[in-house]
Amino acid sequence: METIGILAAILGLLMVLIAGKQGFMAFFSVVINFCLLFITILLLSSGFPPLATALFSAICILAITIYMGNTDEQTSNTAFLATICVMLVMLCLIIPFDHLAQVQGFANEQSEEIEAFNLLIGVSFEQILVATTLLSTLGAIAEAAIAIASGLKEVIEENKQINRAALFRSGRNIGFQIMGMTFNTLFFGMFGGNLALFILLNKLHNSFSYYLNSKIFVAECLLVLYSAIAVILVILFTTWLMGRKLPAKKES
Amino acid sequence: MSVKNKRSLLIACCLLLVGGLIYFLSWHDAFLYHQDIAEVTQVTPLSSHKTQDEFKNSDQTHRQEVHLRLLNGKHADKKVTVKNTWSNSGAFDQNFSAGQQVFVDLQKSAHGLTGQISGFKRDTYLLLLCWLVIALLFLTMKFAGLKALFSVIINFCVFIFFVNLDVSLNLNNFFWLFVLSALIFTALSLAIVIGWNKQCVVTFASITAGTALALGIGVLVLKATSSSLHYESLDFATQAPKQLFLSATVIGLLGAVMDAATDIVSTIFELKRAQPQLSVKQLSLSGLSVGRAILGPLVNVLLLIFFAETVPLAVLFFRTGNSIAYTFDWTMTLGVVQSLISGIGIALVIPAASVLAAWSLKKEG
């Protein structure tokens, strides 16, 4: 607790020093998101329907991340709309896929960790998995949506006569840079988060077939792949939404 | 229909075809496995009964008889019947249904073949989702999109190599091994994304500076408050947990720090190209303003990724009567500390990248 307090204070101080008022708002949004996530876990534990709870907190988290981090209202609105749409599309992908792949709950590698518990606790771990998968993709899509919306707004402002096709081309260029880096963030986040797991797996198993089928490894991979898909979709959606207001052909 | 539309239609059809092929092949790849694989042909429910634990959690367990048809090995096409128990919550078990493929451990007994289900075959789904990512990348960004993927794949190979190296060397100070791997990751990713030039060197320097400083702060705070962390709650720890934790932190924050640094440095270099008269101060200020906009969202990305991992365990803790403080301590503290150190890294790399990039351009002019 003490460690967290000191580190949080340092982070808050640094964010305010570096980014001033905007930094304060950003730090505040991180704190609120943390509280929201914690409350979500409490609600899930007390038996609220996982999907509805996750959707509700997802919309709150998106609104906070997008509107508190960003000052321009038009780009925020576009980014928010795009992330909500992508979230709904992702839900249609996550629910059937998580059911098919059966990666809910705990894996054999975690049996030591959970052996003290009675696991018949009356909550559906499959639905919890869908809920957490949904939540874990939010950060990446919010970041990508904001970045591309503000990037495209710059483009439109610099060249007021730009037509839709040209904007889509810029969207692809900006989107590519954003995507490459977001992929890095996601994958290194996963490598780092699962370093101990990778070392353990390396000590226990060496077969390729194990990696392709093990519950825990597949679960972690699916999580990153969902985020990657969501990021690609949100780039497309945001670009499309920004271009919708422009004329299809250049007026001459 | 224009030629361009026809071409994209053709590409989409090809991708769909490849997807179908991946599905078909991975569904029929049992012959590639050494383990015995079987298909569930029929499931008969046997009995169910309700359970309630001391925390008033009611659940239901079900017994079922699973009829299997073996798909590979010397017993191919033989039939086996096994028993399975599953619960409504499904934390550690699963309900089988006809059409699924499973791994089985077979035993020969007097009555013929018997066995148990030892695992579920998931390769089809993993490969299909990988295919979906690649197809989407290709459709939206053409070959440029595959470049981003290429960087990830190379880094994954390097990562696996270092994990292997760590396991086989079994060093006492393996933290430095992962620091080395982090440096290589950074250099590789930047070289692939930016290309090998001055901009790449400046970005690399600012990432190293920001990360090292953040880690230094993290280690100092951890030293000063060493008693309050449960390193033993680190999942899957098979080596010194504190070093493992720090290694995981370094690698985990790398992506986000790279993201911030690349954005800032490329903006400053672009500005200098467009308006060569800009001063060092003006350049670093524009760098800072780019950094300001991405600071919050980036910290949020890491927070959300980390939180998702802790949810099932935290729910289990709460449902079995543990207090909020105890649950937080044992399931989340390490993750929160890791996210905070990453956040500090992201915050510090912003001034580091702004100043270094602006200063490097001054020397040139």
Image: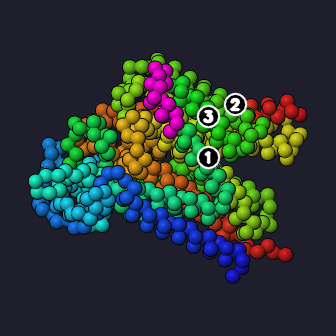
Q: Which residue is mark 3?
A: B184
Q: Is residue B172 magenta?
A: yes
Position of the N terminus of chain A, as image quadrant, is top left
The mark closer to the camera, 3 or 2, is 3
x and y, in percent, of residue A242 in the image? 66, 64
Q: Nearer the viewer, residue A185 or A191?
A: A191
x and y, in percent, of residue A17 in the image? 63, 31
Pointer 3: residues within 10 angstroms few (<14), some, or many (20+)?
some
Q: Chain of mark 2?
A: B
Q: Is residue B167 magenta?
A: yes
Q: Is residue A66 above or below residue B254?
A: below
Residue pictured at 37% horizontal, 58% vertical:
B31
Tell me how far mark 2 sits from mark 1, CA to CA.
20 Å
Is residue B289 visible in the rendered image? The answer is no
| Helix, strand or loop for disc 1 | helix
Pointer 1: residues within 10 angstroms few (<14), some, or many (20+)?
many
Q: Which residue is mark 1?
A: B151
Pointer 2: residues within 10 angstroms few (<14), some, or many (20+)?
some
Q: Is residue B243 left or right of residue A156?
A: left
Q: Chain of mark 3?
A: B
Q: Main secondary structure of the magenta part?
A: helix
Cβ atoms under marks 3 and 1 closer than 8 Å: no
x and y, in percent, of residue B75 in the image? 26, 59
Q: Is residue B67 left or right of residue B39?
A: left
The mark closer to the camera, 2 or 1, is 1
| Stretch in magenta | B160-174
Mark before the other along the chain sequence, 3 or 1: 1
Q: Chain of mark 1?
A: B
**Residue that sits furthest to the front in the current view:** B74
Where on the picture, by quarter, is residue A15? top right
Residue pictured at 62% horizontal, 70% vertical:
B11
| Helix, strand or loop for disc 2 | helix
